[in-house]
Amino acid sequence: MRQVLLGILAGCAFVIVAGSASGQGVEHGRKYKAPPPTAHIVVTVVKGFNDKPLPNAAVVFHAVRNGLNDGNLEVKTDPDGKATIDVIEIGSQVTVQVIANGFATYASDIAVDGPTKELLVKLQRPKAQVSDYEDNDGKPAPVTPTIVQEHVVQKPVSPPAATPPPASTTPPAPNGTPQ
């Protein structure tokens, strides 16, 4: 009797489990949409004059896909000068900007058209700026290369103060009357 009862319970359990499993084929709620495929992008930043890696340089990624702005992402380079990112969608147009202290800023547009993309950036020291303005002698205005150029305001030159007349060298009279 006990075996028959266990057999009936096992059969009922099988029917219940089988019935609930067949109900899982019906979709309820939101549909799952897989995320778009992304690319593995590696930017290697080196010094232009000796090809040594440049650590702690800021690499800014500005992605645009189908005319829509995907936002900006900033990654710092590791001690080997490499910045790696894995969240930019394949098919995006990306502006890569590299900023480091003591070096001229670098920018380039790249098309992310495959699962991997590598970019080598050689940063240069700042150079003199080219100017359309001329100084008073008709020569191009010289601008020296510096890391940060600040606007310098010249203080106005005031005319020299009027000098007081020289004091008389003759001593006054003893009674206070002039001589």
Image: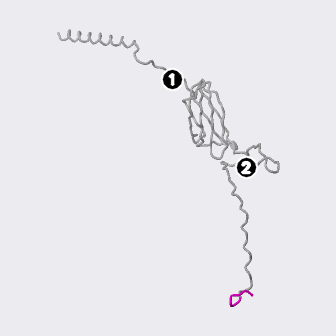
| Label 2, residues with CA under 10 Å away: few <14, some 14-19, many ≥20 | few
Residue 8 horizontal side relative to residue 58, left or right: left
| Label 1, residues with CA under 10 Å away: few <14, some 14-19, many ≥20 | few
**Measured from the top left, where is residue 27 in percent x and y?**
41, 14
**What residue span does the magenta drawing correspond to?**
173-179
Which residue does the numbered mark 1 point to in the structure image?
A: 35
Say which quadrant the N terminus sits in: top left
- Tell me the number on the disc at residue 13: none
Q: What amino acid type is highlighted by mark number 1?
A: Pro
**Measured from the top left, where is residue 34 in percent x and y?**
49, 21
Q: Which one is earlier in the sequence, the residue at label 2 or at label 1?
A: 1
Question: Which is more foreground, mark 2 or mark 1?
Answer: 2
Q: Is residue 94 above or below residue 47?
A: above
Tell me which secondary structure the magenta stretch mostly adopts: loop
**Measured from the top left, where is residue 38 in percent x and y?**
55, 26
Residue 99 horizontal side relative to residue 145, left or right: left
